Image (cartoon, rainbow, N blue to C red):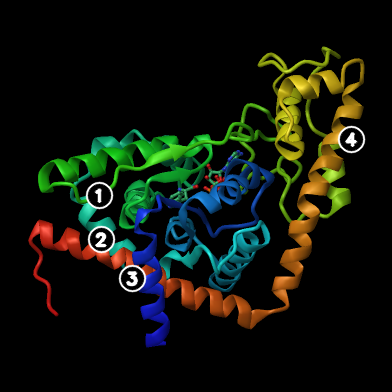
Amino acid sequence: MCGTIILREEKSEMNKDQKVLYSGMQATGNLTLGNYLGALKNWVNLASEYECFYGVMDLHSLTVRQNPAEFRAHARELMMLYIAAGIDPEKNCLYLQSSVPAHAELAWILDCFTYMGELQRMTQFKDKSARHSDNINAGLFTYPVLMAADILLYQTDVVPVGVDQLQHLEITRDIAQRFNSIYGDVFTIPEPYIGKVGAKIMSLQDPAKKMSKSDENPNASIFLMDDPDTIRRKCKRAITDSEATIAYRDEQPGLKNLFDIYCACVSKTPDEAVAEFAGCGYGQVKEAVGEAVVSVLKPLQDRVKELQKDKSYIDNVIKTNAERAYYCANKTLRKVKKKVGLTEIR
Ligand code: ATP
Ligand code: LTN
């Protein structure tokens, strides 16, 4: 075990010149096509250029009540989805947020550098407290500070996320700049990375809302593990409009969303997609979108099914990557504690 830690420390020292990428998802429920096209797919595309850390954000998930057994299973499933999507756990650090205590420790310190007014402005807090009015807990309120701690602990340069997370990135940068202005250059200031296509996939049943894991209408979201017939059916039932015109424009949000999904799946531009379907009916577009999504998700689903059979492999990934994350995170945490004047006992 000690030997493994030393090897992993050496690896981090060696990669000092490589820029750092950090991202993560909450370990709640089933991932949607929005999570995949808006975030996960970009992670895979960027992985070779950066030293990458991908967290399974299980501490964040506690802001909503979880069934313990299901929650534990979801965290493992999410780890499998990361791997199935193409993130190699030998080359990238995939780990559970809760296995690195430095996240919670830095979050507390950063809480003391964050203003109530800043947190009150967060739209995700407003949305989630409206949706969970029976459980507006302090964790939901300070959620962005824990997210800032996640990012800043690894001296992150770039954070690939969907558009809905931009506000959290902005507050992360503000907190880091505030801290640095008092104590010197402790934190790298991270930049968001938003993909060109798929940055905001909308609900198939209400194109004004983002596609979300927690939508009550099961036809609104395509889940990554949906079987092909379910995917085709959900696409067929997607809400469009009565204009009967093939175009990519804001006035036809349902069709625009279908084109966004199609383009992200087949790597085409909206203009190319519109040209391809010129003269077609919406039914043909929906059918093609369904097939494109099935083709993108099939290999990922097959790989998840294989991984589900190999418990010890995932156990091993969880353990060894946690050691590396622990080492990197604690380097920053030690620096922060020293700067603010906390006593270190060796
Ligand atoms: P919930 O809907 O339950 O609040 P979520 O689906 O937003 O959760 P998160 O774990 O909060 O899931 O998000 C994980 C990543 O997926 C983030 O980078 C987020 O920006 C991205 N993402 C989520 N939904 C979409 C979407 N509809 N389109 C594009 N990106 C998305
Ligand atoms: N809040 C994020 C999940 C998340 C995250 C992070 C993303 C928690 N910590 C750090 C990027 C970097 C969300 O997607 N809802």
Q: Earlier in the sequence, mark 1 or mark 3?
A: 1
* Image quadrant assignment for residue 51: bottom left
Q: Amino acid at mark 3?
A: Tyr
Q: Are marks 3 and 2 in contact (CB under 8 Å)?
A: no
Nearest the viewer among 167 and 52 is 52
Spot occupied by residue 36 in the image (x, y as percentages of width and height): 64, 47
| Residue that appears at 12% across and 77% down | 345
C-alpha separation, residue under disc 3 versus residue under disc 2: 9 Å
Left or right of residue 220: residue 332: left
Q: Secondary structure at mark 2?
A: helix
x and y, in percent, of residue 133 in the image: 46, 45
Mark 4 vs mark 2, CA separation in Å:
50 Å
- In whole angstroms, how far apart are the C-alphas of marks 1 and 2? 8 Å
Q: The residue tagged with tag 3: helix, strand or loop?
A: helix
What residue does disc 1 label?
Answer: 187
| Residues at discs 3 and 4 in contact (Cβ within 8 Å) | no
Q: Is residue 192 visible?
A: yes
What residue would you read off at disc 2? 332
Closer to us: mark 4 or mark 2?
Answer: 2
When the figure is inspected, residue 250 is found, relative to residue 228, above or below; the finding is above
- Find disc 4 in the rendering and name its residue: 287
